[in-house]
Amino acid sequence: IAKRIAPGSHVFFNQEMADEVQERLRISNALQQALANNELELYFQPQQQVQDNRQLGVEVLLRWLPPGKKPIPPGHFIPIAEETSLICDIGDWVLQQTCSRIQSWQAGGHAPGRVAVNISARHFHSTHFVSRLSRLLLQYPACRHNLTLEVTEGVILENLQESRNRMTQIKALGVNLSIDDFGTGYSSFAYLRELPVDELKLDRSFIQHIDQRPQDKAIIACLLELANTLQLSVVAEGVETEPQLATLAELNCPAYQGYLRARPMPEADLLRWLAAQ
Ligand code: C2E
Ligand code: MG
Ligand code: MG
Ligand code: MG
């Protein structure tokens, strides 16, 4: 809220604003408790090859499961966590849990492929991010070369030079980097030249009408060509229908994820799902 207030302007706090602050504070406190009480859980959404549906990997998507209540989707609590260093605690927990899962899957002969984790800006740019990641990979060696970090364009453009250094260090650890929600943030792609990025995730908003709107199809074709030229891999997000998938196949998009094939699911369901493939 403070960000919305121009410096020097007259500020009238109304009841609605006060209520919003109260509500966010309540959620933030509850979330801190939830982290301590193990109410957070990793869900996993499979990613497949477009051409033959071969399993490629999974994306980790966080859920908050308060006892006796409906699961709370990340859109309701991640933005609040991002207002404070709580997002770093949550992010560290997600990374640790993910690495522990990868290690145990490998030991058990399960192979969902590479595993992608979403990283918030504040966490990515925090002082100890790379050293913690490095320590985690020593603790869980099976995760090296199997882990991808997803960051948004906003994370990078917050500080390009700093992001480049960080990304170079992360790449040196054997961890891959992906740009999430690609195409939604900024119109210039020039920054891609300067960064050791491996993959682009094409935002669902472009995929949604790809089989109906020639404009959207043209944009995706263009982004695929860009990715090809820069030798980046691509995952299309939010594929819900066969016609959308057919259009992606026609455009030679390599990989996708979406409700058409699988929703995000808890670990036990994922292992069953993988075994049934
Ligand atoms: P995202 O990383 O872009 O993840 C994709 C979102 O699209 C997920 O929502 C996923 O469930 C949803 N999705 C996947 N396929 C489809 C589809 O076919 N149709 C539709 N309508 N939606 C689909 P979710 O799980 O609610 O996560 C929302 C966002 O929350 C994520 O967007 C990500 O930015 C953030 N997030 C999730 N988990 C974490 C986390 O562990 N850490 C951080 N920092 N952010 C997270
Ligand atoms: Mg993501
Ligand atoms: Mg995304
Ligand atoms: Mg998103």
Image (cartoon, helix red, strand yellow):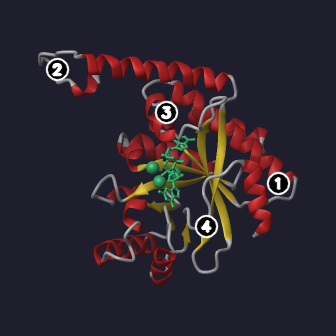
Q: Nearer the viewer, mark 3 or mark 1?
A: 3
Q: Which mark is residue 106?
A: 1
Q: Which residue is mark 3?
A: 77
Q: In the image shown, does 130 or 68 lie closer to the viewer?
A: 68
Secondary structure of the residue carrying tag 1 is helix
Residue at figure coordinates x 56%, y 25% from the top left: 31
Report the residue that reaches farthest toward the front: 68
Instruction: Looking at the image, tell me whether mark 3 or mark 1 is earlier in sequence order.
Output: 3
12 is higher (above) or lower (below) than 125: above
Residue at figure coordinates x 66%, y 66% from the top left: 56
Q: CA distance from mark 1 to mark 2?
A: 54 Å
Instruction: Looking at the image, tell me whether mark 4 or mark 2 is earlier in sequence order.
Output: 2
Q: Which mark is residue 261?
A: 4
Tag 2: amino acid = Pro
Q: In the image shown, does 242 or 229 lie closer to the viewer?
A: 242
Tag 1: amino acid = Gln
